[in-house]
């Protein structure tokens, strides 16, 4: 028999709803900025997330403060990809380039996180949830499939572009799809004011 | 005559035991999986009961991974609730696995969205990791021999007729 909803749970639920709607609102804001590439083959959308948004999301998931403190120092982009073709194409983050005037920006590979979390004694549950919020490094997209997740960059004040390529075909032998999105910025907390 | 009837019976049995006939179009977003034995799955549910996939041999199992923070999961879970309501007397087994969330979070979410679901608790996320889903949500259909036969891409409207018919065809053909 599950317990009745306690005051603590009610507050958590309430905060979850508030965060959900604030994230949804900020997604609409990002969409207004049109960080989108779309043609007849693919749609790629980017939603920059501010440190406050990420902290709110991870704190609501009960991540340790020290983990949230680390994460909010980075630049988060939620990427959503839709395969509009009738064929398979491949996401490979190694072929995604985030480029500013000063050169190519550094992306944090998902392999870099586990060692860091281990040194910080981060609980497995938080590590697991964190992993599932990341965009996969490589993924075969089936026709009409949508998938999304976070890409993490070293934070910068600069404006930058994304140049991404996707190999087409089960065996990656049917050419590639190029996507480009310009005028991207890391979201700052005061963007929401 | 009897021999002929036996042949027809065997033929019908062969067709039905293959589950969904190969010539039929699968519902949108359902993909066949070949040669993948289901990874181990032994978890406690939120009420403390134990679930073991191995003990489900002889039945089709609907294995679903989700988390309350994932938008497509939030949209899909009411459809699974409705599927559960219509599947109560059928032999499809449900393993609805929450990935690495606390009991409070799950209870608050399911209490509103899907009160009939008794989720399995993958507290450290390691079972989910072993299954290597493409993302969350993810659904696998495991056959009575413990082999993954189908996977669903993302969230699916499981309570729609074509999906329910598809699931029925598996159970009937087991």
Image (cartoon, rainbow, N blue to C red):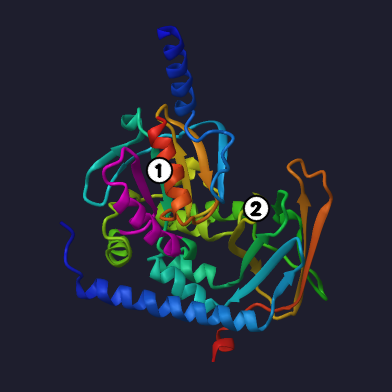
Does residue B50 appear in this view? yes
Residue B33 vertical position relative to residue A109 in the rendered view, above or below: above
Where does the image place residue A185, in percent across and percent down from the top left? 69, 79
Q: Position of residue A61 (x, y in %)?
A: 40, 66
State the quadrant of the N terminus of chain A. bottom left
The foreground one among B65 and A54 is B65
Numbered disc 2: secondary structure:
loop
**In the rendered image, the vertical position of residue B124 relative to residue B7, given as above or below:** below
Q: Which mark is residue A29?
A: none
Residue at the spot 47% in from the left edge and 32% down from the top edge: B19
Of circles 1 and 2, the one toward us is 1
Horizontal side of residue A184 vs B126, given as left or right: right
The reply to whether residue A123 is visible in this rendering is no
Q: Look at 41% across and 34% down and name the residue there.
A: B40
Label 1: few (<14), some (14–19) or many (≥20) C-alpha neighbours in 10 Å? some
Q: Secondary structure at mark 1?
A: strand
Residue drawn at x 36%, y 52% is: B83
Q: Position of residue A174 (x, y in %)?
A: 82, 47
Give the x, y percent position of residue B85: 29, 53
Is residue B118 placed above or below B114 in the rendered structure? above
Residues shaded magenta: B73-102
Vertical arrangement, residue B55 with respect to residue B162, above or below: above
In the image, B115: left or right of B12? left
Which residue position holds label 1? B62
**Which numbered circle lies on residue A137?**
2
| Subunit bearing disc 2 | A
């Amino acid at each position: 028999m599950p317990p009745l909803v306690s005051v603590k749970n009610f507050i958590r639920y309430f905060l979850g709803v508030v965060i959900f709607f604030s994230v949804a609102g900020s997604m609409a804001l990002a969409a207004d900025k049109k960080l989108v590439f779309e043609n007849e083959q693919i749609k790629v959308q980017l939603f920059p997330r501010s440190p406050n948004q990420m902290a709110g999301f991870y704190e609501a998931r009960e991540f340790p403060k020290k983990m949230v403190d680390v994460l909010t120092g980075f630049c988060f982009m939620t990427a959503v990809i839709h395969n509009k073709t009738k064929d398979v194409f491949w996401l490979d983050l190694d072929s995604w380039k985030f480029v500013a005037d000063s050169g190519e920006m550094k992306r944090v590979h998902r392999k870099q996180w586990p060692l860091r979390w281990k040194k910080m004694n981060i609980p497995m549950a938080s590590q697991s949830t964190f992993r599932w919020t990341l965009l996969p490094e490589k993924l075969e997209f089936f026709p009409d499939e949508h998938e999304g997740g976070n890409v993490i960059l070293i934070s910068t004040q600069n404006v930058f572009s994304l140049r991404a390529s996707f190999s087409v075909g089960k065996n990656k032998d049917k050419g590639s799809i190029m996507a480009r999105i310009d005028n991207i910025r890391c979201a700052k907390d005061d963007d929401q004011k | 005559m009897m021999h002929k009837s036996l042949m027809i019976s065997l033929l019908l049995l062969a067709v039905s035991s293959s589950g969904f006939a190969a010539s039929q179009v699968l519902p949108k977003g359902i993909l066949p999986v070949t040669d993948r034995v289901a990874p181990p799955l032994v978890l406690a549910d939120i009420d403390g009961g134990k679930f073991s996939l191995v003990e489900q041999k002889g039945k089709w199992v609907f294995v679903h991974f989700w988390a309350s923070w994932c938008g497509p999961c939030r949209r899909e879970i009411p459809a699974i609730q409705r599927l559960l309501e219509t599947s109560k007397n059928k032999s499809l087994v449900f393993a609805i696995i929450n990935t690495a969330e606390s009991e409070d979070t799950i209870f608050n979410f399911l209490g509103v969205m899907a009160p009939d679901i008794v989720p399995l608790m993958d507290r450290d996320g390691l079972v989910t990791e072993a299954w290597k889903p493409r993302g969350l949500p993810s659904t696998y259909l495991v056959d009575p021999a413990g082999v993954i036969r189908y996977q669903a891409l993302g969230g699916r409207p499981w309570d729609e007729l074509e999906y329910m018919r598809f699931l029925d065809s598996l159970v009937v053909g087991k």
